[in-house]
């Protein structure tokens, strides 16, 4: 039977290098905050309890953590990672299972990797997530003998021989709650930083006759984010991961390097995505749909066989049926569009419900906002909306209705009716010629004066 699991997320840092009014762990990667990424990671491995350790000044982090349903522990002052874990003890209460320590600024660890860390506790008492970077630099080193981890040495405290070790510490580790808090209580701060290092628990527990081992991850997974350049690197790493997964799942990306996804983008096999497309959160796209270049799509559900763009913007609440078409320079928002309907050119369709087989002419807009409230436009099956129509909501266009071009439609249109709502054209013979002559004389007189 699998032991109960908990996670402690360390998020009490001051974020000074990010140079932001927001705490760094609330900055987004792939449309989701780093804190949310790590909370989701903990939930993905069935953590029964998740404690977020914050500082007194991190009021925005605390609010975000509470909104995510996390328990809160406060670390003040910040005296190191060991101290931070000790601060979480009270929030865990009588929890007696296995505990993983995670970092809110390390958002890209895969659930399978954390699962391996927990699984390692089947044969060891402490499992530490390690990696082998190209440049070990200031990372703490993992000192191993055979299959056992014997010590974690911070770079500032390491000897020249230890600095030559290429296996580094990610900071992530797991142990039973009893072992972790027993060891943390015995950590001292006799080190170069004068802090309580969580890493010291490896040697402490080994002194108790316990065993520690290393689980390896890729350098990309354990990438920490401390600055804007770090954030950009993490975003790139996430996007590269998503691009690979999309193509492996049968999605065509015409120019992968210019295609950007959110954490929850879902695209079915045989969809074809053009260059320079951006997908925000909550997008689902059916198979055989083509997204032409330069589209921005978020909060949108698209059926199968649709044609989108180029240069389309689909905003939250858009639902497009099968074989729909939304063309160049079209914007939609809270628009439900039935199968086989077309909005091909230069239109805005917002707060609207379109039936099946509707044709919306170029330059059409739904006038949905009266300055105070939004109103709905309803268009029935098979209706034809003439070019340059303005549909002043609330308004209902019946099935099979036909709207003449250039109309300002303010009243409901019955099924199968023709609606013409524009002023009658008047031609004044010779007026243009007389006007040109008069203007020429005026210019001539100005020059002479």
Image: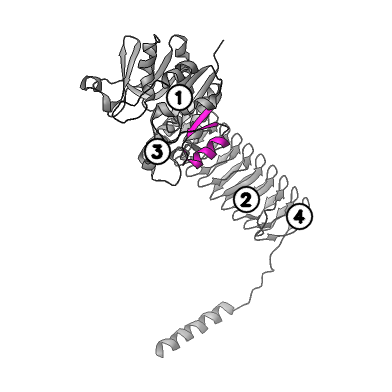
Badge 2 density bin: few <14, some 14–19, many ≥20, Cα 10 Å:
many
Q: Would you say the residues marked 2 and 1 are in contact, meaning their CB atoms lie under 8 Å apart?
A: no
In the rendered image of this protein, does residue 170 appear above or below residue 75?
A: above
Q: Does residue 420 appear left or right of residue 238 in this picture?
A: right
- Pointer 3: what residue? 231
Mark positioned earlier in the residue sequence (1 or 3): 1
Q: In percent of the image, x 66 and y 72: which residue is there?
A: 426
Q: Which residues are magenta?
A: 50-73
Measured Cα–Cα span from mark 3 to mark 2:
35 Å
In the rendered structure, are the residues bearing label 3 and label 4 in contact, judged by CB atoms less than 8 Å apart?
Answer: no
Q: Do we see residue 134 in this rendering?
A: no
> Which of the two discs, 2 and 1, sits closer to the camera?
1
Q: Are marks 4 and 2 in contact (CB under 8 Å)?
A: no
CA neighbours of label 4 inside 10 A, class few (<14), some (14 to 19), many (20+): some
Sequence-wise first label, 3 or 2: 3
What secondary structure is found at the residue carrying circle 1?
strand
The nearer-to-camera label among 4 and 2 is: 2
Cα separation, mark 3 vs mark 4, equals 53 Å
Residues 277 and 207: in front is 207
| Badge 4 or badge 1: first in the primary sequence | 1
SS of the residue under disc 2 = strand
- Gap in Å between the C-alphas at discs 4 and 1? 63 Å
- Determine the secondary structure under disc 3: helix
| Numbered badge on residue 413 | 4
Most foreground residue, 325 or 43: 43
Query: For the residues carrying marks 1 and 3, which lies nearer the camera in this image?
Result: 1
Q: Is residue 34 above or below residue 437?
A: above
Rendered residue at 67%/69% (across/down): 425
Q: How many marks?
A: 4
């Amino acid at each position: 039977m699998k032991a109960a699991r908990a996670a402690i997320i360390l998020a009490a840092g001051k974020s000074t290098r990010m140079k932001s009014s927001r705490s760094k762990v609330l900055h987004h990667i792939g449309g989701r905050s780093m804190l949310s990424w790590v909370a989701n990671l903990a939930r993905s491995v069935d953590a029964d309890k998740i404690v977020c350790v914050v500082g007194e000044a991190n009021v925005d982090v605390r609010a975000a953590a509470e909104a995510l349903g996390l328990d809160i522990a406060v670390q003040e002052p910040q005296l190191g990672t060991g101290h931070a874990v000790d601060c979480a003890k009270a929030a865990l209460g009588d929890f007696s299972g296995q505990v993983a320590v995670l970092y809110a600024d390390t958002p890209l660890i895969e659930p399978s990797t954390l699962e391996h860390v927990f699984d390692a506790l089947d044969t060891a008492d402490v499992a530490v997530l390690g990696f082998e970077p190209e440049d070990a630099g200031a990372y703490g080193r993992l000192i191993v003998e055979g299959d056992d981890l014997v010590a974690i040495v911070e770079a500032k405290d390491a000897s020249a021989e230890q600095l030559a070790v290429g296996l580094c510490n990610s900071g992530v580790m797991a142990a039973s709650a009893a072992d972790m808090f027993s060891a943390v209580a015995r950590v001292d701060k006799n080190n170069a930083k004068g802090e309580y290092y969580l890493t010291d628990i490896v040697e402490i527990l080994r002194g108790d006759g316990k065993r520690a081992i290393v689980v390896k991850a890729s350098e990309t997974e354990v990438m920490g984010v401390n600055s804007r350049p770090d954030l950009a690197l993490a975003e790139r790493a996430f996007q590269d991961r998503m691009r690979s997964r999309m193509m492996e799942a049968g999605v065509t990306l015409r120019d992968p390097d210019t295609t950007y996804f959110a954490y929850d983008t879902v695209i079915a096999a045989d969809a074809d995505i053009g260059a320079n497309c951006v997908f925000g959160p909550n997008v689902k796209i059916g198979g055989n749909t083509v997204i032409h270049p330069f589209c921005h799509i978020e909060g949108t559900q698209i059926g199968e066989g649709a044609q989108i763009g180029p240069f389309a913007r689909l905003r939250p609440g858009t639902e497009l049926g099968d074989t729909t078409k939304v063309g160049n320079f079209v914007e939609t928002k809270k628009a439900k569009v039935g199968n086989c309907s077309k909005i091909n050119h230069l239109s805005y369709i917002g707060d609207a419900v379109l039936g099946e087989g509707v044709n919306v002419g170029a330059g059409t807009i739904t006038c949905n906002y009266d300055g105070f409230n939004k109103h709905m436009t309803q268009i029935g099956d098979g209706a034809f909306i003439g070019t340059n129509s303005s549909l002043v909501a609330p308004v209902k266009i019946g099935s099979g209705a036909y709207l003449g071009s250039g109309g300002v439609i303010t009243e409901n249109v019955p099924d199968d009716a023709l609606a013409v709502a524009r002023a009658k054209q008047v031609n004044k013979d010779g007026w243009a010629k007389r006007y040109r002559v008069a203007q020429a004389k005026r210019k001539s007189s100005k020059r002479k004066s």
